[in-house]
Amino acid sequence: MAEALVLHPDRLLPPDPGVRAVTRRLYDAVRALPVLSPHGHVDPRVLLDDAPFPDPTALLITPDHYLTRLLHASGVPLADLGVGRAGLTEAESRAAWRLLCEHWPAFRGTASRSWLEAELSEVFDVRLRPSARTADAVYDTIAARLAEDAYRPRALFERFGIEVLATTDDPCDDLAPHAALAADPTFPGRVLPTFRPDRYLEAGSPDWPALVARLGEVSGCDTGSYRGWVAAMEQRRAHFRAHGATSADHSHADVGTEPLEPGVVERSYARALAGTASAAECTALRRHMLLEMARMSVEDGLVMTLHPGVRRNHHRPTLHASGPDTGHDIPLRGDFTDPLRPLLERYGTHPGLHLVLFTLDESVFSREIAPLAGFYPSVFVGAPWWFLDAPAAVRRFRGAVTETAGFRRTSGFVDDTRAFCSIPARHDMSRRLDAGYLAGLVAEHVLDEDEAVETLVDLVAVRPREVFRL
C-alpha cells in the first residue's frame, strides 16, 4: 500500500546484480560490528540522567538541524519546530510533527529522509510512511514507545551497539557528567569529552575578553597576559585528558597557522583584550594560537581535528531569534596546502601528532587533503562531514581520495550528530556505501574479495580506534 513504510534490504547498494551480490557479502561482515563515534554532539547528561525522552518532536526533529533547515526552507518557522525554545507543549509538539509529515516530499532524495526512515522503521517499528494523513498515527506510535523502559537513553545506547561516543565540550566545562558516567558501574559504555576551544581563539568576537577571563578563573591561570592564555589552555587540556578525552576539535573560517614573533603576539594579545586590535591582528592571533594548539597536541597526545570553511550563523535574524547551530551555517571554499604549511613543517612528521582534516569543499579532497595525507605521517583524511555525509558525496569521496591516499590514511566514519537516534542509521549508511565501493574494486579485479572484507572491517572497527586514539 502507498502509505506503508518499508525499507528495502538492498537500499544504497549498487544496482548491478553481480556487484550487488559481492556488496551483500562485504556488508554482512560489518553490519553488526560496534559503533565507534569519535566526534558528535550528544549531550552526556542524556545518558547520565537516563530520563525518558519527552516526545517525538523533542527527540527526532528539534535537535536535528538537517531536518529543521529544509523545513525552514519550505516556509516553516523554526520556532514552530521547538528550535530556540525551552520546550513545547504536547499540542505544540504534535503540531510540529504534523508539519514534518506534511512537508515529507521536501526530503525526497536526501540523506535526511534515509536516516529518519531508518529511525522510524528500525528503532520505533513504525510501519506508516509520514504524510499529512498518517502524522498523528506515527506520532502516537513513537510516543507509546518512548514510555517504555526499552526506549530510555541507556537502553538505546546498548541496543545501538555503541562502544564509544565522543561529545563536544567547552574548555571551561567541569565535565562532571563524564566523570559520573565513568564511575557508574551500571553503565558499561564509554562517553568521552572532546576539547573544543574555538570561541576562546576568536579574539575579534565581542565576548572574547569575557571568555578569556572565565578561562582564567577556571584554570587558575592569569589570562591577563599571552603566556597566561597559553598556560590556561594547557591546563584545561590536561583536565580533559584526565576525564578521558582523546581529541581536540577546531573549526574556524580558515586553517592558517602562521607564527608571530614573541613581541608581536604579546602586543596583539594585549590590544585584543583592550578591544583595540584590528580585525587583521585578531585573525593573525588566532592563526598563531592554532599553531600553538598543534604544539600542545604533539606534547599531550590529543588528536587534532580541523574542520574549517563554514560561515557560521549566515542569517543574523535567525541567530538572534533561535541561537547558533540552528541550520544556517553555510560552507565556504577550502584551502589547506599553504595555510597548513607552517604547522606541517614543524610537526607534520612528528610521531606525537595525529591531524585529521575535514572539509565541506569537495574540490580539495583530491587536490589538497589526499596528497597531504599521502606524504605526512601525521595527516589523515577526515570522512565526508556535515553537508557531504550523504550517499553520492560519500561515493565521490572514495573516488577522489583512494587512488592517492588509500584507505588507511582515512579516519573512518564520523556521524557528527546531535540527533541521538540517527547514530545507527548514519553508521549503517556508511557501511553500505563503503561495501559498495569496495565491491566495485572487486568486480574490476583491483582487489580480491578477501582484501575487500579486510579493508571494510578496518574502516569500521580499526581506523577510528587508531586515528582517534580510542
Image: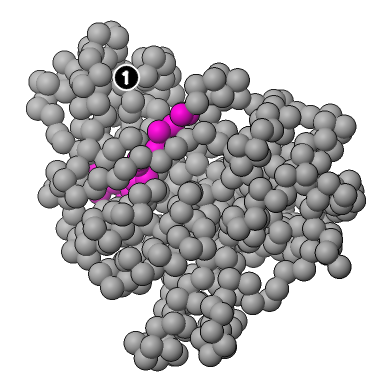
Residue 337 located left or right of residue 173? left
Which of the 4 quarters of the picture holds residue 199? top left
Q: Is residue 363 magenta?
A: no
| In the foreground, 333 or 270 | 333
**Residue 290 percent across, percent down from the top left:** 26, 37
The residue carrying pointer 1 sits among few (fewer than 14), some (14 to 19) or many (20 or more) residues within 10 Å by Cα, namely many
* Callout 1: SS: loop
**Residue 175 percent across, percent down from the top left:** 53, 37
Residue 47 located left or right of residue 243? right
Magenta highlight range: 293-314
Which of the 4 quarters of the picture holds residue 195? top left
Q: Quadrant of the C terminus?
A: bottom left
**Residue 239 percent across, percent down from the top left:** 42, 38
* Residue located 84% across and 38% down the image: 94
Q: Is residue 347 shown to the viewer in this render?
A: no
Q: Amino acid at mark 1?
A: Gly
Q: Is residue 160 shown to the viewer in this render?
A: yes
